[in-house]
Amino acid sequence: MYAYVRGTVLWVEEEALVLSSNGLGLRIRVLPAVLDAASEGGDLELFLHHLVREESEALVGFTSRDQVRLFATLLDVSGVGPKVALALLATHGAERLRRALVDGDETLLSKAPGVGRRLAARIIRSEEHTSELQS
């Protein structure tokens, strides 16, 4: 549903920021690096992933389409939720994470918070992400 937004940062929270776009304030969860760089009143553009759960909805924002595609791909792996997918991207960045997945580097993946060896192995074995990772 939502794919992209550009606007002004109204305020920064612990794990999210509120972005004003056309009179609408959107709370968007972002990577720590984006939070650190964001300043109130500054302009920001984000590529979005709209999370819909039974009990909630949330927007997750990224600075590139590559990051949002990798995030969505990780969510397809059993046992990987938004918190773990964000931790993987925050810890390794998109390129390093993609390389670790392609190379089957369980040790590197397990350095992200919330990712143990078993989950790292499941992420690597998951065939759903193979074609996406090589693009």
Image (cartoon, rainbow, N blue to C red):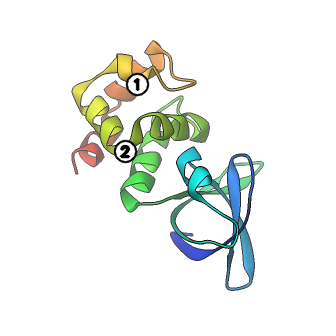
Residue 130 makes an appearance in the image: yes
* Residue 40 place in picture, x, y as percent: 70, 67
Q: Is residue 13 above or below residue 24?
A: above
Image point (37%, 22%), residue name: 108
Image point (22%, 27%), residue name: 103
**Occupied quadrant, residue 118:** top left
> In which quadrant is the N terminus drawn?
bottom right
Asked if residue 58 lies left or right of residue 1, the reply is: right
- Tag on residue 109? 1
Q: Is residue 65 above or below residue 126?
A: below
Q: Nearer the viewer, residue 92 or 85?
A: 92
Image point (49%, 42%), residue name: 75
Under mark 1, the amino acid is: Leu
Q: Secondary structure at mark 1?
A: helix
- Tag on residue 94? 2
- Disc 2 residue crowd, few under 14, some 14–19, many 20+, Cα 10 Å: some
* Residue 89 place in picture, x, y as percent: 46, 40
* Residue 135 place in picture, x, y as percent: 22, 51
Image point (41%, 45%), residue name: 73
**In the rendered structure, which disc, 1 or 2, sits on the residue that comes first in sequence?**
2
The reply to whether callout 1 and callout 2 are in contact (CB within 8 Å) is: no
Asked if residue 112 lies left or right of residue 121, the reply is: right
Give the Cα separation between the discs numbered 1 and 2. Answer: 12 Å
Q: Nearer the viewer, residue 92 or 123?
A: 92
- Disc 1 residue crowd, few under 14, some 14–19, many 20+, Cα 10 Å: many
- Tag on residue 90? none
Under mark 2, the amino acid is: Ala
Q: Nearer the viewer, residue 64 or 131?
A: 64
Q: Is residue 52 above or below residue 4?
A: above
**Occupied quadrant, residue 69:** bottom left
Q: Secondary structure at mark 2?
A: helix
* Residue 54 place in picture, x, y as percent: 73, 48
